[in-house]
Image (cartoon, grey):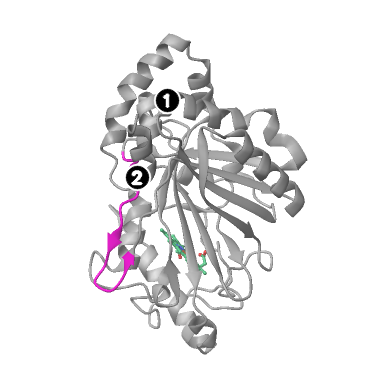
Amino acid sequence: MTPQPGIFAVGAPEHCYLELDGAPGSDPADLVGALAGLLGPASGIAGACVTVGLRPELWRAVAPAAAPPDAASFEHIAGPEITIPAAQHDAWVWIAGGSRSGVFDVAVSVSRSLRPRFGVAHEIGGWVYRTERDLTGFIDGTENPAPVEAPEAAIRTESPGEGSSVLLFQQWRHLDTFAELPVAEQERVIGRTKADSVELGEDVMPPDSHVSRTVIEEEGEELAIYRRNTSYGGPSDHGTVFVGFCARRHPLERMLRRMAGAEDGVRDALTRYTVPLTGAYYVVPALDALADVVDQPDDDRARRSRTARTPHATHPTGSGSQKLRAR
Ligand code: HEM
């Protein structure tokens, strides 16, 4: 099973992310087919790379054998002081490329080609700040798995769902108060030095630093995810587009719960300076699994679509499911 190559295609400076909802009364298999069609020749236009994801319940309904078992829509996470909100949609499209014009052209063509099946619910442009830094000024990705290890963290190697990835997609808005802190205090918030991203020593590492909250061991193994974050926005409204891939949902969810203080009441200090605006999980299916859906004979697809409606009706947070249900 071949994962979508865009997950690992590093180096592009320009990005556009679209979150979409299916039109009322849509046939789920038809929606998935339309998304799969984006990975055809059009994805090469203007040198942009297109990656697609689907709301977990939507993908499972259409291709049950290709769905990671623990994948599910995002539900808000409540800590003692903050809530990480859910903003789940039916589909996610990521366009990455070398030029803003090229990415723009492909994004416009993608959103037009998906009409009327899909409407864009949320769109955001991402860009790379100072080669490798987040807008906090810190290097982002130091502890990301190296290219050879990234597929192990990001891609499921077993059935069901072999070759797929679970994506956590979020928009975080930065507050000016972080830049106003002395650098030494910023470093205690992150848990690494600002200039060169050296991890603080155990003796000085605060328990609520971002590193302390996201480094989690289970059965002697550190939970690993693969991050492809970018920056968004302009001078007065900006932040981080969090794009985190994992072979399963559990590590992503645990990291978020610990950041919110939902497990032990300790809130990630970073969340005092940056605000989660959205939260959604998507399955990023293997290329072959998407092709299988497109290649299904029409009567198979119709049968799948009929059985697909029940799970959508129980979807907890997304408006998309409501629309699909409203036939
Ligand atoms: C505004 C949002 C965020 C910002 C600005 C941010 C920034 C950073 C920075 C600067 C680092 C240290 C350098 C590195 O190892 O990459 C880091 C590490 C990390 N972050 Fe975040 N992050 C954000 C959200 C998240 C979220 C939502 C998660 C997980 C759900 C997460 C998971 C991690 C992990 C796993 C590490 C590596 C920890 C280690 O092994 O030392 N981050 N982040």
Q: Residues within 10 Å of mark 2 (few under 14, many from 20)?
A: many
213 or 23, nearer to the observer: 23
Residue that numbered label 2 is attached to: 73
Q: Position of residue 138 (x, y in %)?
A: 57, 73
316 or 135, nearer to the observer: 316
Whether 238 is drawn above or below 194: the answer is: above
Judged by its main secondary structure, the magenta piece is loop
Q: Position of residue 164 (x, y in %)?
A: 46, 35
- Write down the quadrant of residue 213 in the picture: bottom left
The residue depicted at 48 percent of the width and 29 percent of the height is 32
Q: Magenta includes 112?
A: no
Q: Magenta stretch?
A: 70-83
124 or 79, nearer to the observer: 124
Q: Dot 1: what SS?
A: loop
Q: Residues within 10 Å of mark 1 (few under 14, many from 20)?
A: many
- Which amino acid does the dot numbered 2 rest on? Ser
Q: Is residue 31 left or right of residue 60?
A: right
Distance between the Cα atoms at labels 1 and 2? 19 Å
The residue depicted at 28 percent of the width and 35 percent of the height is 313
Mark identifier at residue 27: 1
Residue most extreme to the bottom:
182
Disc 1 + disc 2, Cβ < 8 Å: no
- Write down the quadrant of residue 315 in the picture: top left
The answer as to whether callout 2 falls within 8 Å of ligand 1 is no
The quadrant of the picture occupied by the C terminus is top left
- Which amino acid does the dot numbered 1 rest on? Asp
The residue depicted at 70 percent of the width and 56 percent of the height is 13
How many circles with numbers are drawn on the protein?
2
